[in-house]
Image (cartoon, rainbow, N blue to C red):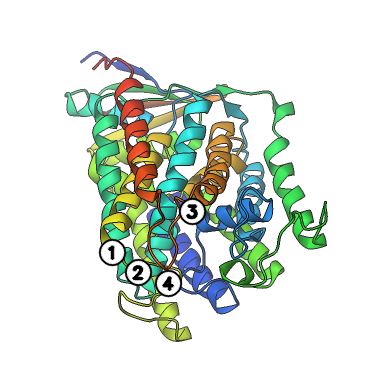
Amino acid sequence: MTTKHIDARGLSCPQPVVLVDRAIVAGNTDLEILVDNEVAFENITRLATRRGLKADVRQEGSDIVIRTAKA
Amino acid sequence: MKNIFSTRMGIIAVGAVIGIGAALLQYFGNPPNMGICVACFERDIAGALGLHRVDVVQYLRPEIMGFVLGAFAAALCAREYKPRGGSAPLIRFFLGIFAMLGALVFLGCPWRALLRLAGGDGNAILGLLGLISGIFIGVQFLKRGYSLGRSYAQRKASNWIFPTLMVGLLLFLLFQVTFTPGGPIFFSLKGPGSQHAPIFISLITGLVIGALAQRSRFCTMGAFRDVILIKDFHLISGVAALLVFAFAMNLILGQFKGGFEGQPIAHTNHVWNFLGMTLAGLAFVLAGGCPGRQLFLSGEGDMDAAIFALGMIVGAGIAHNFATASSPKGIAAFGPAAVIIGFIFCLIIGFTQRDKITA
């Protein structure tokens, strides 16, 4: 499955989670999500775990990149 | 480094601290059937500054300053202080105005609604039902792509403004400054504005809550919103803890008084208790946070949240100058009009502020 990219930088709560949830509900499990704050990172990783995905995280400059995959 | 406050146990602990803190503040002198109310306290600050002239609700509430400065300190320590802004500030300002107008029809923000319930005030049930209804309406907009657009990093040099304002208000309070004879800073001699815990107890409690709430992302609106929107029970576990611990503390301190009639600083107009909070709930969803959360965010450097908070303070001035704010005697002459106009505004914003959904 191709990776779906989501740029959630600068978006305020709950936009990042809404975008990710919409993608997961549409059947995507391989996501690459870009966020620029801790809150979005915490919310998205919590959502991913609840939806049965695992989340890998890496820092890229001031941004955080979250990659999800089926757990 | 893992943020322990944003775990499930962390946010429950924070909710407990807020519930206990609010009950204790009431015990130490804050208004009865209240403890903490972000809307009422911002209204009291508006009064102290002379933005309205209702002499029973004028006091520079240190809890509000504490919330902002505590969050500011916590964000700095955790390296989460990020100056940002530029996401439809004028819309957020007016959302703040209408959120306050709605809250003052009910006589409380979501924090106070929960604390009133924890104190036995049955009228809070209508307020909470209204809040949940307003949040439900807001969620429908969120599902259809509602967004005020992204915010942008701002220069670090601009971000001393809001914390400095809070420190300034604190200094006005501590030194009981007056500028003109018979003019602000006003201090109520009777009524709720005259009921306050000692300044340092209020300030320390505010600072602690501000720091804990910033770390835990505590948000009473988000709590209900996340259950409705994505069936996430994380934030609401913190809210439940607030309710339970405030209730327990009220029982211990003898502050529990069950019933609808005769509740302090409350009225029994069920329809407008409900509708006032429906408007408030909708406005909070559209603005992305409950009034407490907006203060904690502004401490973090979020200038859009700071503008919402300033809108609430201005809205409080409007509410009392234009006879929209309720009193224990009931709703005011133009309260219903304010709520209706507020709904129209929020519905227009909800329908028009949308990004195209690309699934």
Q: Chain of mark 3?
A: B
Q: Nearer the viewer, residue B266 or B201?
A: B266
- Residues at marks 1 and 2, CA–CA distance in whole angstroms: 7 Å
Q: Nearer the viewer, residue B290 or B217?
A: B290
* Residue occupied by mark 4: B246
Q: Is residue A50 left or right of residue B314?
A: left
Mark 2 residue element:
helix
Are discs 2 and 3 less than 8 Å apart at CB?
Answer: no
* Residue occupied by mark 2: B117
Residue type highlighted by circle 4: Ala
Residue type highlighted by circle 3: Phe
- Residues at marks 3 and 4, CA–CA distance in whole angstroms: 20 Å
Does residue A14 lie above or below B131 as drawn?
above
In the image, are marks 1 and 2 on the same chain?
Answer: yes
- Residues at marks 4 and 2, CA–CA distance in whole angstroms: 9 Å
Q: Quadrant of residue B31?
A: bottom right
* Residue occupied by mark 3: B5
* Residue B3 in sight: no
Q: Which numbered disc flags the more N-terminal residue, 2 or 3?
A: 3
